[in-house]
Structures are given as C-alpha cells and as structure tokens.
Image (spheres, rainbow, N blue to C red):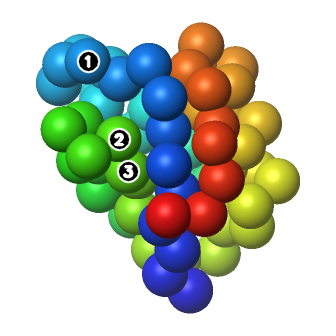
Amino acid sequence: MNASYRIDGMTCQGCARSVTKAIQAVVPMAEVAVDVDAGVVTVTGPADVGQVKGAVEDAGFDFIGPA
C-alpha cells in the first residue's frame, strides 16, 4: 500500500526524521518519505490511516489528511 498524507508543522529535516521515526515505531515495516516543503509524507507498507495519524500527532505535528 502506498498513501500520501498532508502534515502541518514540519519546517526542517529534523522534523522529517521525527515523523519518520514515529511512523516506523508504530509500523516497523513501513517505508516513509517526507517532503518538508510540500508538507507531505508518503508511507509505503502495511500502515493504515489511523496508525499514521496517531504517530504523527504523537510526534507533535498536525495530521491534515490524505494528500
């Protein structure tokens, strides 16, 4: 599965690492690609929207929804 989501609050590569680590902590098999400038994270693997949303929000960012 490949899905992209809009995330608000990311401003740097440190933010991208935080989001990546948070998602991979919940879904270790997921591949995560973050585009900080666009505010989009793309998750490839067995992650559902609820898992991604929870991980992103736990990391301190705002989950907007599908991109």
Checking the image for residue 40, the label placed there is 3
Q: Is residue 33 above or below residue 47?
A: above
Which amino acid type is marked by label 1?
Answer: Thr
- Looking at the image, which residue is at 30% across and 28% down? 17
Checking the image for residue 2, the label placed there is none
Give coordinates of residue 35: x percent, y percent. Answer: 23, 47
CA–CA distance in space, label 3 to label 1: 12 Å
Residue 29 visible to an observer of this rendering:
no
Give coordinates of residue 33: x percent, y percent. Answer: 29, 56
Quarter residue 19 falls in: top left
> Which comes before the other along the chain, label 2 or label 1?
1
Secondary structure beneath label 2:
loop
Secondary structure beneath label 3:
strand
* Image position of 54 (left or right of 66): right
- Looking at the image, which residue is at 69% across and 25% down? 57
Quarter residue 55 falls in: top right
Checking the image for residue 39, the label placed there is 2
Give coordinates of residue 63: x percent, y percent. Answer: 64, 37
**Callout 2–callout 3 Cβ contact below 8 Å:** yes
Q: Is residue 19 above or below residue 38?
A: above
* Residue where numbered disc 1 is placed: 11
Secondary structure beneath label 1:
loop
* Mark 1 nearby-residue class (10 Å; few <14, some 14–19, many ≥20): few
* Mark 3 nearby-residue class (10 Å; few <14, some 14–19, many ≥20): many
Which amino acid type is marked by label 3?
Answer: Val
Give coordinates of residue 5: x percent, y percent. Answer: 53, 57
CA–CA distance in space, label 2 to label 1: 9 Å
* Mark 2 nearby-residue class (10 Å; few <14, some 14–19, many ≥20): some
- Looking at the image, which residue is at 44% across and 19% down? 9
Q: Is residue 34 above or below residue 56?
A: below
> Which comes before the other along the chain, label 3 or label 1?
1
Can you say which quadrant of the picture contains the N terminus?
bottom right
